[in-house]
Amino acid sequence: MRYVTKSADFLLLFLSLSGALFAGGIKGTVKYEGKVPRMKAIRMAADPICDGKHTQGPARAEWLLAGPEGVLQNVFVYVEKGLEGKEFKTPETSAVIDQRGCIYVPHVSGVQVGQKIDILNSDGTLHNVHAMPKVKKNVAFNEAMPGARKKITKQFDEKEVMVRIKCDVHPWMGAFVGVLDHPFFAVTDKAGNFEIKGLPAGTYTVTAWHERLPAKSATVTVKGEGEATADFVLKRPPKKKN
Amino acid sequence: MERQERHYNILSLNKLFAISSIFFLILLIWTFAYDYDRSWKDYQRKFRLMDSDLTTELRTAEQGRVEESTDYKAASAELAKAMEMLESRAEDLKVLEEQQKKIESKYYKVQQESAFAKSLYDVAKYEYEAAVSHYDGPAEKQKREMDELGADVYQKMMVVQEVETELALKKSEIAEMTLAVDKAEKSVNSLERQIELYSRKLKTIDPGSMTIGNRMANAVRDLPVIDFMNPYLKINQIIIPDITDDMNIVQMPKVDRCTTCHLGIDKPGFEDAPQPYSSHPNLDLFLASSSAHPMEDYGCTSCHAGRGRGTDFVTAAHTPSSHEQEKEWVKKYNWYEMHYWETPMYPTQSVEAGCLKCHASQPFIEGADDLNVGLALFEKASCNGCHLVERYEGKFPQRLAPNLSHLASKTTREWAYRWIEAPRNFRQNTWMPHFFDAADWDKEEDRSRTDQEIHAIVDYLFDKSAPFELSAMPRLGNSERGEYLFNNLGCKGCHKLELEPENTPYTLASLRQEHGPNLTGLGSKTTQEWLFNWVKDPKKYHPETRMPNLRLSDVEAADLSSYLYSFSNDQFMASSIPNVNEEMQSDITFEFLIKANSHRVASETLASMSLADMLDYNGEKLLQHYGCTGCHLIPGFEDAKRIGVALDGEGSKPLNKLDFGYTSIPHTKIDWFINKVKNPRVFDLNKITGTYDGLRMPNYGFTDEEVEKIVTVILALNTNDGREKPVSASRSFIEEGQWIIKDHNCMGCHLIEDRGGDILVNYSAPEYAPPNLNTEGEKVQPHWLLSFFENPITIRPNILVRMPSFHLGEEKWNSLIKYFQYYDNQTTPYEGDFSPRENSIAFRAGEKIHEMGACNNCHYYGVTQPLQEPQTWAPNLALAKERLRPDWVDAWMNDPQSIMPGTKMPRPYIPSEDELSMADASEIYGTDLLKLAGDEETMIRGLTDYIYAIPGKIDISLEIKAFFDENGYRFLEGEEESEDWDEDWDEDWDEEEWEE
């Protein structure tokens, strides 16, 4: 039995080495096309502690953060198809979501199945962390985090894009966590850029998910070395008829 | 030839005898062979092969699995190691064993000696006793002898014990040496147990695995004649003494021989095998001995019906599920319907009909999905308005349709005429059936007669309509505001306003969502004033209505009625209405008069009647004739009887009692029922009947799918004997409550027993919808629940939907309270008051948890408003002590999500032992919590204590209403636009900002 685990370790090592050796990656920019809505100021008056954290002017909503030329932040880009049947080790390091200034930081993030998520409370006021996964194996939770409780650790056990987390005390607070069974995902930065590294050669379906805008997918082929490019342009959904 | 003194020729007679004896011999053999050759034997032979293949397969798989398993590898390695060890000491073992043998023989010898000595002693003892008692003389000699022998016995016994010890020692010495091997062998065997079981089974069914003796027996045991002894091929039967088949004269215990051919039915592993071998599709619920319906207690035909004693395909009374299957069976099995078996097997699509016999007292039968929909359709169509069904007596109302006592105040004669003529023209999915515009119209004269019949009915209803005082509306009402109320107050728990596309299949959920009528087109039907009065107080107009009272203010009622009134159906109102025809009316009057009078009396009476008299007279007779009184309360017919046949037992009516008339419908029971439900007067085709003697059942416009489900219900109403288990008291309390819940559609709004809560689809999140009622019986105090039922107050301040006042009366409310309690096994009716132990450590710890949890962010404390925005608001904590049971509060605090999935109530923060042992713990958590470190239970109980001590006003309905009257429910708005779960942020989709 020991032999078996050892050989499995070797295999993993080999796989990751070969991945590193031969793997490329996917890089790209996500842009938003259309008029950029103004993010409204959040009224935090109901909780003086929250309000007190924003002396430089009020916090604003984050549901569509587009920069010059529409470069779009907080887009979760991930490999949706092309990795079937492969297994990846769960990282030992925890992902972190902080509650700072009564805002979740980061607003959008990704973790692997089974990876620990440390949820911090840097505010010193009561938050409750209410996760609302939809798939069966992911356990919904709703934990109170008074000022004194600085950290809780949770995890999700099944693939799900995305799990929404909210705070019922501060209804403006929301975050999204993508749960995947592989490490090939990224969240766009302020400049709308993302980079997925260490992807073995192959053809993949890559999807860009945004909390309000309809997702888009692209087929991307990664050759032995070098990086493939995938750019996405997201548009607002068609207006609903009333 | 010599002439013989006989009148016959012996030679030719011999020939005749010879031929006939050969003939009879052949006949005998043929009879024998025919009798011996049964179809079930082929099935059994084939199944035996399948079973042996499957078992071999399973054994191989199990062997593979076991041999691969680490446990087995470890155990066999252990065994090998132990054997090796033992081998190396084989010499020692041999020596020991020889020694043991020697000791054993010695033991035998000394034991014998001891036994002999004992018997000699017994003789001496007897002699001494006899000498003392009989001869009365000196007995020293005997005594001496006895004592000597006694000493000898004692000595010998000591020797035996010594040898015994020696032997035990030796044995344990050997056991010690073989201990490791024995242990390893045992664990290997236990892992191989399943393989061994398979092997044993194979020895009985697979000739290849048998011993030679068994193989020989196997070859001959099923031969003719000797197969009476111990055949392999034999009829299997299950006898159930307390479920009987009705044989008309006697009740015979059920004997089910189905397993003679359905050999894999109770065995897992044959799921994909062809019929008749496949496993039952639901072994967890049926057949398995651990299931609710073990095979040995219920057999097969108790549920499936059919003829259990039959051992071939036809005589078992199988029923095809379609005409195609019927044709196939005729070809394959020479199938025909066993006419005189009253309960042939249910066809596949109606298999759930078998559930009702035993479960008739339950309003809902878990797992019987089609039957449940069928029953719901049956109830919704008010079949029991005309047909008595025992199951509904005293549990479910007979008259579900509107009360017609004050019809004139509600609608016009014109609307009523058009409605009676063709209700589905007004609303395609109405449950009011077509009496006149039915499919079986063929003659123009009938058409003009029915026009007059409708006139007469309308005339009667409006003439007899009692005055009803409508109170005036304070204002016209705002339709937009009314729409908002309709969407949010809870109307959608029972009503829809949009029509589903025609023929949308019904589900239990969609039937609950239209528990009340669809409200489309009300503007054409009634007046806004009437609607205002109705929604304000439905029971005033119709005391028996199931529509509850939403406690609307005058303004709300005006707004709501204005909205409902805005929908009209102009097309419906455009159809023309023929005039009253006096001649035709007098014909109708005469038809009815002649039924009960002589020609002379009838003519005289008719002559004395005016047109108005005739209309009234005809209306009365026709309402009675068509059975309108089954579903509607009509003046003058308050005590009317049902006009249809009672349906209990209908499912087992013999075929020859079903009249197919002159139709070409195939003569099977199922076909009769299907056609009857689909087109109720079809069997009158080409019959000459009097005008009012034919079939009267109206047409409901059921789809084929609905017909199939209703036929399932009819088949279920049969005389097939069920096992009537005595219902326990708690079970009957639960069922009583379930009937009330069904009758009043509680599940339209609330999730109960994990079903219902259908109104939720209209809300962005469960927290804005009616609460689910999981654990309600454990949750609330019964006396509070009664006061809430009778006078609902606002509990959840952030929701607009309102618990209506049902006015069910104390008795029904108590039944419902009992239901909740018994459903949750919470059966103590009276509980002492809970007094929080103020000033205890736990109480102060609870206070600290409460403070850290900042409960006042969301909860009301009496009239003190929560700190956060209204959308976060939660129940008044001062109400807890009146409303909740403390044990439940503990459980709730432990894990709110498990009780109400999706609740915004977080689990309170209870500091862990580690956190409480940090250096600055007493500063953060206070000393009381520190003292309780690690004792979460006491901390939570302390929190409950604290909550029960929160003072304040208990009923804050008015305060909450005042707040929202002023500020509105802004956070609930814009829901329509919401996408899945981002409703909270939806107001950000501001159209202006998006304009390009």
Image: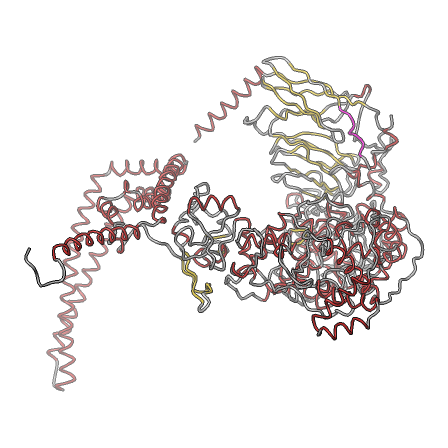
> Please, what is the dominant secondary structure of the magenta stretch?
loop
Q: Percent position (x, y) of residue B600?
A: 74, 75
- Part of the protein shown in magenta: A234-240
Is there any visible trace of residue B781 in the rendered image? yes
Looking at the picture, does residue B409 appear above or below residue A89? below
The one of B30 and A143 positioned closer to us in this rendering:
B30
Q: Is residue A239 magenta?
A: yes
Q: Is residue B68 above or below residue B737?
A: above
- At which x and y percent is residue B684? 63, 57
- Would residue B165 be found to the left or right of residue B295 on screen? left
| Residue B41 in magenta stretch | no
Snapshot quadrant of residue A2: top left
B132 left or right, relative to B325 = left
Residue at 60 percent of width and 34 percent of height: A114
* Residue at image coords 52%, 46%: B323
Question: Which residue extends farthest left?
Answer: B2
The percent position of residue B673, horizontal first and vertical second, equals 58, 55
